[in-house]
Amino acid sequence: MSQHFLLSAKARTISEVEVARMSEDEAREVFESLRWSDTDGEPVCSHCGCTESYVINTHTPSGKPVRRYKCKACRKQYTVTSGTIFASHKLELRDYLLATIIFVNAVKGISALQMARALGCQYKTAFVLVHKLRASLMDNQEEVKLEGTVEMDGCYVGKTRPANRKEDRVDLRLASNANPNKRCIIVARQRAEDGTNFSGAVATKTFITKGEYTSTINKIATANITKNSTVHVDGASAYDDLEAWFDMKVGDHSKAYVGENGECSNQAESYFSRFRRLEYGQCHHISPLYLSNYANEISYREDNRRLSNKALMLDVARKCMNTPTHNEWTGYWQGNKRVAERLIA
């Protein structure tokens, strides 16, 4: 039996201890090399794009040193995080890099409470920080259609628990008795092609809906899967219309998890398995308002499960440097929050 990837030396190419022992200047140089990769880490003005700047060493109100740059063209000052999702940060840059490695090392996700304990900061600080990391993953998704063999399925989040006493229980199949916060995650996963060194799924897309409805499934599939691809489903009637655009293969779990011709949705179930570990084992409750961010986080973890933790850390940090300042994560605890969830109509 082959060794699991996470047990191999290839999976652990950096440790949290190494990041924690970095100086602030070393952490800043990492972020500069990621944000200004086209100029080999040389600063580029976030206001006008000029590549010539002065170095200004200043201090925060608490006395911590900060490297600032003053543009020779527009004369405005900026830092490596100016205009990014980490703009106006209060923690040291080393703490943000440490939070990133902690985030990627938690292969089943991490809660804000656990992040707060690891960084030694307030829960509110950690909550916004991990959501900024999720927002960067959300904003930097690849807009490429799935092709080849694709599996589709859905799972529900926020179901109502049955009452304790039998006489108090109601029929939860009726819409009138359902939890108004119940949502469905529709997942589409592209399988690896035969003959490649990679097994399982190679690309994942997730969509938040209020249920597995035929019209919604049709809209998702036709917009995100190339026509004439092979689509595997579990037999739910909502997917029946897909036969008009795709080569359909239907698996019946009551008979077998994998049919005689390979029809199954096991890769979709693999995604749901990891998502449930995040939901039940880490966060315990996920608000519908940010469910899309959590679902996309697990998509990212699944699609990049064969990358080393250093490669993941640098990739997430690079995405943060390429993500502009988020209005909904600036002043969150002062009431500036997302007003509507991201649902597929």
Image (cartoon, rainbow, N blue to C red):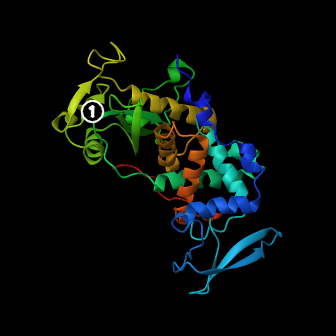
Q: Nearer the viewer, residue 223 or 96?
A: 96
Q: Nearer the viewer, residue 143 or 251?
A: 143
Amino acid beneath label 1: Val
The residue that disc 1 covers is 231
- Describe the element under mark 1 as helix, strand or loop: strand
Q: Nearer the viewer, residue 279 or 182?
A: 279
- 224 sits to left or right of 269: left
x and y, in percent, of residue 302 in the image: 48, 37
- Going by the picture, which residue comes out furthest to the top? 255
x and y, in percent, of residue 229 in the image: 23, 37
> Picture quarter containing residue 59?
bottom right
> Picture quarter containing residue 164?
top right
Q: From what the image shows, is residue 122 above or below residue 74?
A: above
Q: From what the image shows, is residue 164 above or below residue 132?
A: above
Which residue is at 62% across, 80% downward? 53
- 11 sits to left or right of 263: right
Count residues near mark 1 (Cα–Cα under 10 Å), then give few for <14, some for 14-19, many for 20+: many
Which residue is at 60% across, 86% downward? 72
Answer yes or no: is residue 329 visible. Answer: no
- Going by the picture, which residue comes out furthest to the left? 244
- 41 sits to left or right of 20: left
Answer yes or no: is residue 256 visible. Answer: yes
x and y, in percent, of residue 217 in the image: 29, 40
Which residue is at 63% across, 68% downward? 80
x and y, in percent, of residue 121 in the image: 76, 52
Q: Nearer the viewer, residue 307 or 271?
A: 307
Q: From what the image shows, is residue 294 above or below residue 34?
A: above
